[in-house]
Image (cartoon, rainbow, N blue to C red):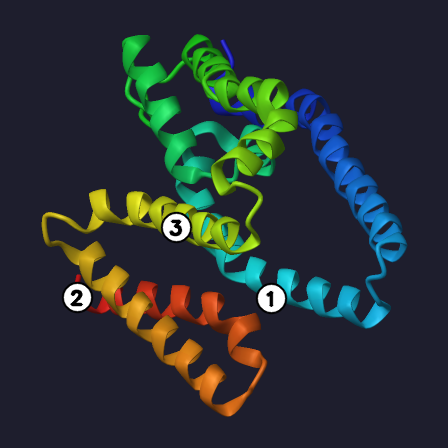
């Protein structure tokens, strides 16, 4: 029998995963084209588009590098094609590793060890793909209703809507941080350092009128947090 990594890295797996990646790229291009078309109709200038594109690009560098670093552990477990596919769709190494680990354990093996077989790998692939369907189904069924909910929650007030949006964002980031930062551990230092760096950059941007902290602040803070956390290992 073939080793499971031979199957996981085979040309057939690359061929099977490539169409899904192409679909993601096509969707990104379609959404960008549609956004620019509607934006111009709404009066958004080319300069504003350039600013938005630049800010989005720079803000994505940090998360992308974090995913790339984390992908090393995923590559060793489920190989290149499946790692490429899953991270292109979900982008969460934590979720994918957890799903693969639980699938392998349920199948009587340990992820990344000699106990892995082709059957266990197939189980991991199914679990990694199926377990994320909840997000997709909820988005498909309720995205068009979010505007109604938003209007009811804010009462039509732009000020209330801004407060609700800011509160929701803070809550989401707090939820993702709190369970890793407490009880105190290395990740606590990383979170605190990242927060301090981001606070300093935002304060500097407001006082000086500089635009680069808004574009690069998140990326710089993420790197500072990672390096600071590594220092306390």
Residue 40 coordinates in the image, percent (x, y)? 88, 57
Q: Given this view, does label 3 or label 1 mark the residue nearer the observer? A: 3
Does any portion of residue 138 appear in the rendered image? yes
Q: Depth check: give the residue in front, 230 or 197.
A: 197
- Residue sitting at x 80%, y 37%: 26
The residue singled out by tag 2 in the image is 232
Task: Measure how far apart labels 3 and 1 are at the Cα level.
Answer: 24 Å
**Label 1 Cα neighbours within 10 Å, binned few <14 / some 14-19 / many ≥20:** some
- Residue sitting at x 47%, y 83%: 206
Q: Quadrant of residue 28?
A: top right
- Residue sitting at x 67%, y 28%: 14
Q: Given this view, does label 2 or label 1 mark the residue nearer the observer? A: 1
Task: Measure how far apart labels 3 and 2 are at the Cα level.
Answer: 31 Å
Q: Earlier in the sequence, mark 2 or mark 1?
A: 1
Q: Depth check: give the residue in front, 20 or 209.
A: 209
Q: Earlier in the sequence, mark 3 or mark 2?
A: 3
**114 lies above or below 49:** above
**86 lies above or below 201:** above
Residue 39 coordinates in the image, percent (x, y)? 82, 54
Q: Which mark is residue 167?
A: 3
Q: Secondary structure at mark 2?
A: loop
Does any portion of residue 115 appear in the rendered image? no
Q: Which mark is residue 110?
A: none
The residue singled out by tag 1 in the image is 58
Q: Which quadrant is home to the C terminus?
A: bottom left
């Amino acid at each position: 029998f073939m080793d499971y990594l031979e199957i996981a890295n085979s040309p057939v797996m690359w061929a099977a995963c490539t169409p899904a990646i192409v679909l993601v790229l096509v969707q990104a291009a379609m959404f960008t084209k549609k956004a620019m078309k509607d934006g111009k109709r709404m009066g958004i200038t080319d300069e504003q588009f350039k600013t938005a594109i630049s800010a989005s690009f720079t803000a994505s560098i940090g998360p992308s590098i974090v995913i790339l670093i984390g992908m090393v552990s995923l590559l060793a477990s489920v190989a290149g094609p499946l790692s490429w596919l899953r991270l292109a769709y979900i982008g969460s190494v934590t979720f994918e590793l957890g799903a693969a680990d639980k699938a392998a354990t349920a199948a009587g093996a340990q992820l990344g060890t000699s106990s892995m077989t082709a059957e266990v790998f197939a189980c991991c692939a199914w679990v990694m793909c199926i377990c994320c369907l909840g997000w997709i189904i909820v988005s498909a069924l309720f995205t068009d209703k979010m505007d109604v909910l938003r209007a009811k929650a804010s009462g039509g007030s732009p000020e209330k809507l801004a407060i609700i949006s800011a509160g929701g964002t803070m809550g989401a980031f707090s939820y993702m941080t709190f369970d890793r930062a407490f009880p105190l551990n290395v990740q606590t230092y990383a979170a605190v350092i990242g927060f301090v760096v981001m606070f300093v950059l935002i304060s500097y941007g407001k006082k000086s009128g500089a635009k680069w902290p808004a574009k690069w602040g998140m990326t710089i803070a993420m790197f500072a947090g990672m390096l600071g956390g590594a220092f306390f290992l």
